[in-house]
Amino acid sequence: MRTMEPRSDAPFPNTRWSLVAQVKGRPEAREKALGELCGLYWMPVYAFLRRRGMSPADAQDAAQGFLASLLAEDGFSKPDADAGKMRSFLLGALQRWQRGEWRKESALKRGGDREIQSMDALEAEKGFQAEQEGASPEDEFDRSCAMAILEAALQRLAEEQQAAGKGAAFAAMRPLLSPAGGNVSQDEVARELGLSAEALRVALHRLRKRFGELLRVTVADTLADPTEESIAEEMAALRRVLVG
């Protein structure tokens, strides 16, 4: 099947998993790609560890240690052959790491000399507490991955709109695009922007269409072999996790 190569005009770095292996000879580019991937999946790792019973401080340290170990061991370049999804690879790696397979005698604390953390502890804990009660660690991980991918796609859209000089309008409409946007109504946003209900509806339709395109690109970035079929499967999985 032909490999899909989605493109985006958004001013956002390409974080596709395969890029990590492609830039081995360019340390700076590779470090940036790895940093993007770690930033995307920091919250799911933290949420999984919290659901496993760790305290917020211990889960923060463990998330740092796990991601640092992947970087130190070059783990992103040698995933299992059948782990074509970044979330599947990371979950398996995290479970093995927690069982002690990758644990070193001298544990890394908050990444040691490799700073990975992309959100502060309070924000991470707030995100964890907002998740569903009673979910298994694995379900928590999948849901957090889905939310992280949605947020990454929204960030792409925000940067694209900012570059087009529409940053303020997008900031007002953004809550209407996100599942975590709160209780803001379309009428409130229309009044804030001085738009008619119809004008806002048209603007939202355009944004949602572009958001869907960028979400597809973001999902493709998490697949080792982003074909039409694999992207469609992962999009369907994302919808199931969010609805469920």
Image: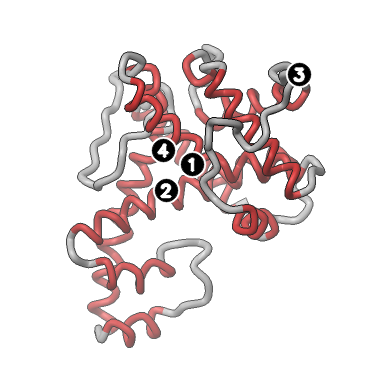
Which residue carries the number 2 mark?
A: 152
Q: Residue at x 50, y 21 (%)?
A: 76
Q: Is residue 199 above or below residue 123?
A: below
**Residue type, mark 4 in image:** Val
Q: Is residue 113 above or below residue 176?
A: above
Residue contact between numbered discs 2 and 1, judged by CB atoms under 8 Å: yes
Q: Residue furthest left?
A: 164
Helix, strand or loop status at disc 4? helix
C-alpha separation, residue under disc 4 versus residue under disc 1: 12 Å
C-alpha separation, residue under disc 2 versus residue under disc 3: 35 Å
> Could you say which disc has been placed on residue 40 in the image?
1
Q: Report how many numbered discs are placed on residues in the image.
A: 4
Residue contact between numbered discs 2 and 4, judged by CB atoms under 8 Å: no
Helix, strand or loop status at disc 3? loop
State the residue in front, 234 or 173: 173
> Could you say which disc has been placed on residue 57 in the image?
none
Q: Nearer the viewer, mark 2 or mark 3?
A: 3
